[in-house]
């Protein structure tokens, strides 16, 4: 298997949120920040964007949600530092009240990651989540010592740009030896644009999109389960 660096998306790829009443801490933090900075009562990006949030970055989520309230791009970018500061403030203030088992691992992902680690593949995260939220989710699911590199939602607005940052941070590894593992069309499209290989897990294995939706991108390998190690290894040969 010609793989020296594996990038992973988080939600729908490594973990999923269990059935919980109410919104996640991340969601509440972002909603609170938009409400506070722009004085918009009751804003909820999940209600506004629906399934479109899968594969989006935190910056693009906020910009798109606020656009529904006629917040212009110029005004959004002028306030982006205030938004991140308010997200962080709310997140830290409410972190102690969250359950430790809010997030759980996708089926068979642990075995796949262990297989990569035994082969001394470097593991990293490429996600639209900001780093603090990423670290919290990974620790919550027991993945806090797995990933040593990557790029996050505060690094860039678009997923392919975040991926490019992660690649630049690992410039010792050639593009042909890098693969991104994700669950959304934007994961596969970003990998194609960055010139690395990609594997997409569909909803049968815990992802957020169907096989048909992923295959429409025309790029990468689509799998039904992280147990399909042989298929992945042949693709990466």
Image (tube, rainbow, N blue to C red):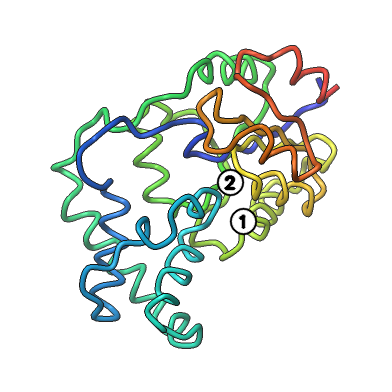
Tell me: 184 left or right of 48.
right
- Assign a secondary structure to mark 1: helix
Q: Residue at x 82, y 24 (%)?
A: 235
Position of residue 143 in the picture relative to residue 190 (left or right): left
Left or right: 101 with respect to 187? left
Residue at the location (68% across, 56% down)? 160
Residue 36, horizontal then vertical, whole percent? 23, 75
Q: Element at badge 2?
A: strand
Residue at the image position 29 percent from the left and 81 percent from the top: 38
User: Dividing the image into 4 quarters, which one contains the N terminus?
Assistant: top right
Judging depth in this view, the residue of 6 and 76 nearest the camera is 76
Q: Nearer the viewer, mark 2 or mark 1?
A: 1
Mark 1 and mark 2 in contact (Cβ < 8 Å)? yes
Pointer 2: what residue? 126
- Of the 4 image quadrants, the one containing the C terminus is top right
Residue 158 lies, in percent from the top left, at 61, 62
The residue where tag 1 is placed is 159
Closer-to-camera residue (229/218): 218
């Amino acid at each position: 298997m010609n793989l020296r660096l594996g990038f992973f998306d988080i939600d729908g790829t490594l973990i999923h949120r269990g059935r919980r009443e109410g919104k996640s801490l991340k969601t509440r933090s972002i909603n609170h920040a938009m409400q506070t900075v722009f004085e918009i009562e009751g804003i909820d990006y999940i209600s506004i964007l629906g399934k479109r949030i899968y594969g989006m970055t935190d910056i693009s989520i906020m910009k798109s949600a606020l656009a529904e309230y006629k917040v212009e791009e110029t005004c959004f970018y002028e306030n982006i530092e205030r938004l991140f500061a308010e997200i962080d403030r709310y997140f830290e203030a409410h972190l102690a009240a969250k359950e430790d088992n809010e997030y759980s691992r996708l089926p068979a992902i642990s075995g796949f990651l262990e297989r990569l680690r035994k082969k001394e593949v470097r593991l990293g995260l490429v996600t639209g989540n900001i780093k603090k939220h990423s670290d919290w989710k990974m620790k919550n699911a027991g993945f806090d010592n797995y990933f040593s590199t990557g790029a996050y939602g505060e690094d860039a607005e678009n997923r392919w740009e975040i991926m490019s940052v992660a690649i630049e941070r690992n410039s010792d590894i050639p593009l042909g030896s890098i693969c991104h593992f994700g669950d959304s069309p934007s994961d596969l499209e970003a990998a194609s644009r960055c010139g690395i290989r990609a594997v997409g897990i569909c909803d049968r294995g815990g992802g957020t999109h169907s096989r048909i939706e992923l295959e429409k991108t025309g790029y990468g390998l689509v799998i039904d389960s992280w147990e399909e190690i042989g298929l992945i290894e042949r693709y990466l040969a």
